[in-house]
Structures are given as structure tokens and as C-alpha cells.
Amino acid sequence: MKKTNQEEIQRHNSQLILKTIYDRAAISRVEISRLTGLTRTTVSDAVARFIQDGVVMEVGILPSRGGKPPILLSIVDDARHLIGLDLADNEFRGAVVNLRGKIIQRACISVEGVDGGEALSLVYQLIEQLHNLTDRPLLGIGIGTPGLMDPQKGMVLNAVNLDWRDLPLGDLLRERFGLPIAIANDCQAAALAEFIFNNPENRDNLVLVKAGRGVGAGIVLGGRSMYGDSFGAGEIGHVKMVADGERCRCGNTGCLETLVSCRAIVGRASAAMEQAGRASRMQAFGDSPEAESEIIFQAYQDGDEMVVPVVDQAGSYLAKALAFLVSVLNINKVVIAGSLARFGDRFAQAIQNQVEREVLPALGRDTRVVTSKLGDDIVILGAAGLLLSQEMGVV
Ligand SMILES: [Zn+2]
């Protein structure tokens, strides 16, 4: 057997053993050997290396059933830290994350009005800040970025909001920080986070729609992110939904994004409230966009008669787009994430009802539309998950 093959097999076996430990709270060497089909010697050698690296530790002893009592092993959750970044909003957000996806520290930098090389320097700054917030060895840096992205090359092909074109972000960061880098589009990272961290026991195929500043979808099919031939799978934000609609930042008119981005919905709902002479309620909370959004989210959940029709109209456009996605992919689970998730279960249910009516009945019956519970950290967690998968093969 060639040396490279042997090395590959050894690496594969090591990853399999580490994943078997990672997937359980505590497990013995004998049980790992039984579950993986690898010899006890192979398991023991690999475990010895992991213990030496500090990634695995012995945590207890099982009662003996004759012979030496088996020792239980666990992953050391904080043996390595990861840096996760979300570049998809008006501020770059980042966190130090442990091997279980737990957020240890956070940092953020405003990018309002900044793009191109300046935005890139802010990415460097944010990473340096986060680097200083942990004293653990770093596994690497995971990034969720807006726009079209080639995850294999780590190349941002086109991110309109940041004015990045053919930017070799992966290479630049690898050279600067000397760490492994994993990068994906923000919606694809969010979909991966939902797949890995939401309910590890139940890993279904899923379509995740993320709407905040922009609108897009991420798809996880057969346990893998689906990127598409030119990495644009799930780019539903710029499908034309209405004739003579509003001008979109992509240059066309009537795109889905102009109808269902959070900014668009909140803008329309606020206007409806003001028209109905309810401006006082809006003003009471000040002028900040966050406060305004908060009022609209709450008013919708309270069943406000001015706000509900406006939000439901937007939801209806989204449902139309989702009906096509569900029909093409036959994926049963649809997750709504980003700021749109703040409209809650009422919004998800309205979309589910419409999708159910507008697809083949046999598909509609099984479609479930839910809101993500991962909140604002979803892209950071997905980027960290991508890195965990790439570097350790444990998720
Ligand atoms: Zn557009």
C-alpha cells in the first residue's frame, strides 16, 4: 500500500473515532471499537493522541463486568476555540465559539457606509479583537459573507453591498493569520447552523430562508450544503415577483427582496400605522430603525389590524417563492431565519398554510414552515460549524 493511502486511511479512522466521541456525552474505548468496527489497538492509539493534544479526556470509570473496568472518554469542549464571523449586516458581528458551538465572547464593528478595501480592514480588525479575547489554541476562522461565494476557493465572487468582486478572502486571511479558514455565503452558513446545532438528533433536509438586509435561501440536502453550479443555489431574492415594482439594488424592479426584506416590510407597516393616525405610538419609541422594527414585530404578533395585512401580504410573496422551491426539491422542512423570524409562529403558520394550498397536495401535506430558534447568532454558528466539519470532521 502506498504511504499516502495509509495516511489517508489513518486520518479517516481518526476522524471517525473523534466524531464517535463527539456525538456522545461519554463513551469507552471498547464501545468506540464496537460502533466503528475498528480494532481496539487502532482506537487506543488514536485516543492516546487526542488525549495528548488535549482534545479528549478521561471522565470516569464504568463498573467492571469482569476484567479491567472501562474508562469513559469525552471531548474537552474548550480544548480549541473558533472564531466565527457574520458579515451580512450593517455591522460585522463575530464571536469566539467552542467546539460545541457555545458562544464564549462577542465583538462587533459598524460598517455603515463602508465598503471595498476599508470593509476588508474592518474584517481584519474584528478578527484581531476576537483573537485577543481567548487564550485557547484556535482551530481556525469561519466566515459567513453576503453575495456569491466559491466556498472551495474561499473566493467572494460578488458581494454588491460590500463592493467585493473576485476577492480571495480565504487566501488573504490564511496568509495574515496563519490559521485554517472556512467561508460560505451567509444564507448557506445559516442553513448549516440549523442543520448542525438546532436539533442534532434529528437532521432533516432543509431549506432556510434568511431575510434581513437582503433575502436568500440556503439548502442542506443529504447532510451537505447544496451550492449549485455557480454557487448561487438559493439566490431567490432577485426573482421578479411583480411587474412595475420598486427598483431593487440589483438594478431590476419588483424583486422578491423589495417585497419581503425586513426593511421593506417594516417600512410599509409603519406607513400604514401612520396613515391610520397612529403616529404617536411610533414616535413614543424614538426614531431608531431597531425600535421601529420592534414595534412592528410586536404589533403583528398582537394581531394589530393595520399591521397584519401588510405583513401577511409580504408573507404571501415569500410563500409563492417557497412553493416553487418545495416543489423543485421536495424538502419538507422550511425554516425562516434572520430578522423575519421575529414575526414569529403566526407568520410561519400563514406561510405554511399558503404553501400547502399552492403545491401538489401530497407535497403540501408534509411541508412544515417554522421559525429558527438560533436568533442573531445563526450565521456565526454556521460558519463555525463549517470549520468544525472541515478541520475535525465531527459535525
Ligand atoms: Zn433585485
Image (cartoon, rainbow, N blue to C red):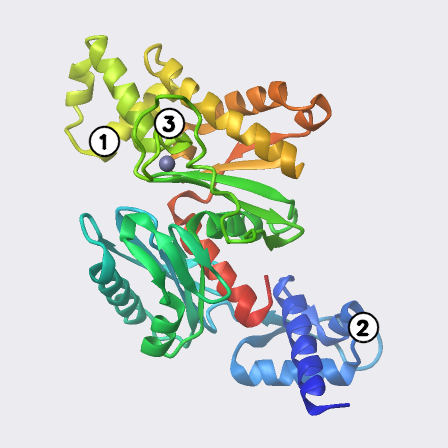
Q: Given the image, on which type of amino acid does mark 3 rest?
A: Gly
Q: Nearer the viewer, mark 2 or mark 3?
A: 3
- The residue closer to the viewer here, 48 or 343, is 343
Give the distance between the C-alpha atoms of the residues marked 1 and 3, in whole angstroms: 27 Å
Tell me if mark 2 has few (under 14), some (14-19) or many (20+) residues whose alpha carbon lies within 10 angstroms of its own: few
Circle 2 sits on which residue? 37
**Label for residue 254?**
3
At x 35%, y 21%, the residue is: 244
Where 201 falls versus 35 (above or below)? above
Where in the figure is residue 256, as x and y percent of width and height? 41, 30
Circle 1 sits on which residue? 291
Give the distance between the C-alpha atoms of the residues marked 2 and 3, in whole angstroms: 56 Å
Where in the figure is residue 339, as x and y percent of width and height? 37, 36
Instruction: Specify which label sits upstream in the sequence, 2 or 3.
Output: 2
Tell me if mark 3 has few (under 14), some (14-19) or many (20+) residues whose alpha carbon lies within 10 angstroms of its own: some
Q: Given the image, on which type of amino acid does mark 2 rest?
A: Gly
Proximity of marks 2 and 1: CB atoms separated by less than 8 Å: no
**Is disc 1's CB within 8 Å of ligand 1?**
no
Element carrying mark 1? helix
Q: Residue furthest right?
A: 66
